[in-house]
Image: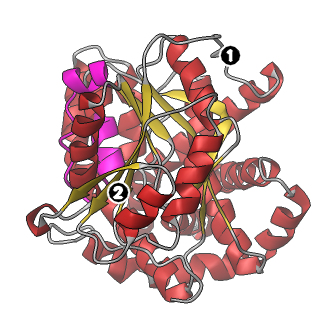
Amino acid sequence: MLRLVLETLAGVACGLSLPLFADLFLAVAGNGILALRGGRGGNEASSWGGQLGVVIPAHNEAQMIAGTVQSVAASADGAVPILVVAHNCTDGTAEAARGAGAQVLELQDDGRAGKSAALRAGFLEAKAMGCTAFAVVDADSTVSAGFVRAMQRGLAAGAQALQCRYEQDGGVATADRLRMLAFRGMNVVRGRGRAAWGCSSGIFGNGFVLTAALLDKVPYMASSIAEDAEHHAAMVAHGERVWWVEDARVTAPLAATRAAHDSQEARWEGGRLRVGLSVAPQLLGALLRGNLQAAEALVAALSLPFSLGVVAAIVCLSLPVGWSRIYGIGCVMVSLLYLATAAQLGEHPAREWRALLAAPAFVVRKLLLLPRIVTQAGKGAAWVRTGRERGE
């Protein structure tokens, strides 16, 4: 009887964690492929005949919006249309954006709260301005010097959707470095690893591009607090994929306080859990119809958050069941390779490795967030702005 209980527990832990570790294995192996190629995906072209506009959804970002607009303008060769959607703002976001040189759409409708409503309005307005593709940049972010040019090259190479490196910055403490490392794993290691296999890299809510033609085919109907994952699943189900752009990045500051960061993490992970379960039937249907692109997206959609996956792997490793221990060892090895890849892709790998010494405490803290993650996975979960200004 005891043996049956242990085998069942091992089977549950293995079944829940398998999608995550399959996704991580593919990501790590894909990054290894890119390293052999010299770190580049090969999407090169000189010019693009369309008009790329930049849409910046903003809610009460008066303190940071000017810097975002200025960094976008500086990343282009010549003028680029920049549209700030000041959505339900109660501060000076619109005035600050105009002062920095952006065009502004003021959207006041409390019944359409959330980033997805701002993006839909922004895409329509930018299209009316003559834009045929739209780069999305969050209102608290800074883009790299060649951001617009790199996106234009990707479009010239034939892409209908693009995602660049999306990272966080602003912390020097060990806990902050661990947060940035985890963020890089999700939004860089996995994205570029998928692209190396010819899969869709995913869109991560910031630093991505969609063409007007693609939006005509797959309208932006996402409405959840994980609108990026929701729309990406819809695109993949329609046979589309997102190309990875290695030589551009967007950087957002870390949340200003631990409370703000915990709120942000719970919203992200809870939202993705809910969206993952809701889009799985759609992706499975696409896979059964012969859309092989949907396979990796389905695995990603069913993946646990990394910290919970590690706990499941430890459970498998600790049980006195032979196959379970072998599986647990494999998962731990994949986890270490994943973290090593994230560390090596940072600007200061040695510092990232030192920060990993505090990873056990970080995992424990993430587990304490589980009740909030479950709450955010519910139907009534709402978008909440993350405070990033250190004065908040």
Disc 2 and disc 1 in contact, CB within 8 angstroms: no
Residue drawn at x 54%, y 69% as measured from the top left: 311
State the image quarter where residue 135 is shown. top left
What is the residue that sits farthest to the right in this orientation?
350
Using residue 267 as the reference point, say whether residue 140 is left or right of it. Answer: right
Where residue 143 appears, as percent x and y from the top left, is 62, 48
Mark 2 / mark 1, whichever is N-terminal: 1
The stretch of residues the image draws in magenta is 212-233
Q: Is residue 239 above or below residue 282?
A: above
Please state the horizontal and vertical placement of residue 365, each as a whole percent of the image. 55, 83
Callout 1, which amino acid? Gly
Q: What residue type is labelled 2?
A: Arg
The answer to whether residue 10 is seen in the rendering is no
Q: Is residue 16 shown left or right of residue 377?
A: right
Tell me what residue is drawn at x 26 percent, y 62 percent: 87
Q: Which image quarter holds the N terminus?
A: bottom left
Query: Which image quadrant for residue 232?
Result: top left
Q: Position of residue 216 (x, y in %)?
A: 20, 23
Which residue is at the front of the view, 196 or 360?
A: 196
Which residue lies under the disc numbered 2? 272
Badge 2 density bin: few <14, some 14–19, many ≥20, Cα 10 Å: many
Element class at badge 2: helix
Where does label 1 land, which residue? 42
Tell me: residue 373, above or below residue 260: above
Which SS class for mark 1?
loop
Q: Residue at x 63, y 78 (%)?
A: 362
Query: Residue 345 versus residue 131: which sits nearer the camera?
Result: 131
Residue situated furthest left in the rendering:
111
User: Would residue 159 be visible to someone looking at this image?
Assistant: yes
Q: Is residue 357 left or right of residue 122?
A: right
Callout in the foreground (2, 1): 1
Q: Which residue is drawn at 21% across and 53% down?
A: 117
